Image (cartoon, coloured by chain):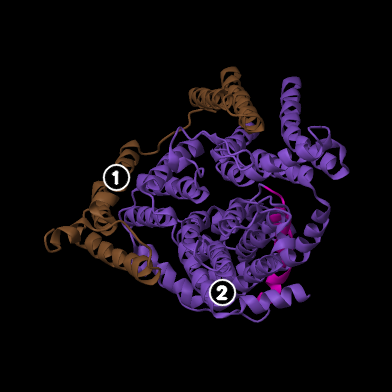
Chain colours: A purple, B brown
Amino acid sequence: MDFYVNALGAVLTIGPLVAMIGATLLGVFIGALPGLNPVMAIALLLPLTYSMDPLVALGMVAGIYNGSMYGGAIPAILLRIPGTPASIATTFDGFPMADKGAASKALKIACWSSAVGGIASAIALMTVGPLLARVTLFFGPAEYFWIAMFGMASVGVMVGSDPVKGVMAAVLGLLIGTIGIDNLSGQARFTFDQTWLLGGLDLIVVLVGLYALPPVLQLAEKCDLKGLSAAQLKLSDVPFEPGERRGLFPTWLRSSGIGIGVGILPGAGGNIAAFLSYNAARNASADPDSFGKGNPQGVAAAECGNNADNAASMIPALALGIPGNVVAALVLSALTIHGLQPGPQLFHQNPMLVGGFMMEMLITSILIFAMGGAVATRAFAQFQRLPGVLLVPSILILMCVGVFVINGRPIDLWVMLAAGIAGYFLEKVNVPLAPIILGMILGPMAEQSVRRALLISRGDATELLTRPISAGLAVMTVLVIVWPIAKTLRRRKARREN
Amino acid sequence: MEKRQDIVLGLIFVGLGLAAAWMARSYTGASGIYPMTLGLILTLLGGTVAAKAVRSGSDEMRQLVAAPSKMITATVIATVYVAAVVPLGFYTASFLLMLVLPIALGFRQWVYATVVAAIFITVVYLVFSVLLEKPLPREAILLLLAPGG
């Protein structure tokens, strides 16, 4: 309990508070603009957090994450354009509600549902995270190595449609992570006699390029020359009717559980949580045919589900160093920026920071109630009057300024551009980008751990497999890779028999 | 699956993996074994992707670029912008980008674009140069206007 009381004291100071409030508003704004997403926004934000207090930086990440997951519902309801991929399911009933003249009510339900899902998820993070971290007290270098391998294997296999491409992306990330001077031997690797490569490729520079540039190029391709008219964005505040909130409670409970479960699984994201929650709500309904035609329960399920994924995805990220989704991978990068090694040791070395971040996830979810409602929704909906084509250079400028201020090196701009163009094409050929970043984050930990483990065992590689926990983790890693292959072979065999 | 794309993708990764493994040969001791192993695994995975594509019976169309002219325009202008940031200065290059890119993509409301550009660049200046005091590439125009410039 002291853990959270101390963390709350640190979070409720002026810096983190201002960061959370500002970032939650900014998050709603980003989510409301189709083409912008939380991943891009956090990637753009990270370079700016170098000189900030870690709790302020993480407060901003938490605010943008929670705010944007709700913000995505605004265009989903008003225009049937999901602001973020996680709000696709919101369009199913949100837009029909708006079509019937109940846009304000749909937005209110989305706001409440997002907040409820976010709060439930943060509570799950605060209870399960420390328990999981306690297990990691028994970890040595061999276990850390397998944790890194398990994380990359699971994200590589589960993200994207082709497990081989996912694992290939993870290995590419590991290889990029070896660029620069080897910490243990002092050997320069893959530097091509370039001094700027001695420190390796900057994680944030690559990350901004990979995640922020592809959506910008896609936005340019869409070439939206006209924003929305003022008439399309006229909204008013509509109160809940008596008993209406009570009616939504079972949906919130069910969707929160689903979102938390999905969040803990590495590789699954808010969109899966939203779809599963939506289906569960329809299956549980006495009138399933009304779904897709403007049923408020559909909006509540989708929005509660996608926000309940948020903090839960941080459980494996903070306790084990395995991000549940891309944003969790970005949070790990934010921790790396501040000199903290993501992974099991984080809870023991920086309890105040981890506890503070958990609190920030909770507080920013509560802030959605306070700020994400009528005022912010109405204000940010107005930004959809801006033509998408003007957003393209704006985001490019933010990317460049963000990357330049990290090291003050023009070469980083070229690295970002190259990474972005590569990311654009890799996404198009179904190579997921998250494992590349994860490989860059976990690669150094994996390499140093395996070499330390071998030094301790005097070169005996069996040591990596003979300790009970490391053996268990090794088996899990193999299973994670073999399972989808076995499933594909079984499916192919069944198809042949049919 | 688009066969040709996956074959090319697989071969690119095979090339990358082999190049990494070959370069890692010259690194001493354990610092070479790790990247060499990764290079060989990457080669194997790239080969698997290419082989899978060759063996696959289906060949669905997969669009690599949705609007090639727009994508190329945006990429070329972004490249020119990155090249111009240091010689022209950050704010000058950014202001020009805010005007040129939308126009190149078909936006014809000059006044609207100029107003948005002015507001946006002012906000960026206030945040990065005034509030955060981050050093950015100096403006060439200010150097020219300076006495003796």
Q: Is residue B74 left or right of residue A497?
A: left
Magenta-colored span: A244-266
Q: Which quadrant: the N terminus of chain B? A: top right
Which of these two is toward me, B43 or B143? B143
Q: Which residue is mark 1?
A: B83
- Please name the residue shown 53% across and 69% down the image: A107
- Percent x, y of residue A467: 87, 41
**Lateral position of residue A407 relative to residue A334, left or right:** left
Kindly identify the residue that appears in the image at 65 percent across and 67 percent down: A353
Q: Which residue is mark 2?
A: A16
Q: Residue furthest left?
A: B148
Q: Is residue B85 left or right of residue A237?
A: left
User: Where, by quadrant of the figure, is residue B26 drawn?
Assistant: top right
Say which chain tag 1 marks: B
Residue occupying the point 73% across, 20% down: A496
Q: Mostly what secondary structure, the magenta segment?
A: helix
Residue A403 position in % (x across, y down): 42, 53
Residue A255 is covered by the magenta coloring: yes
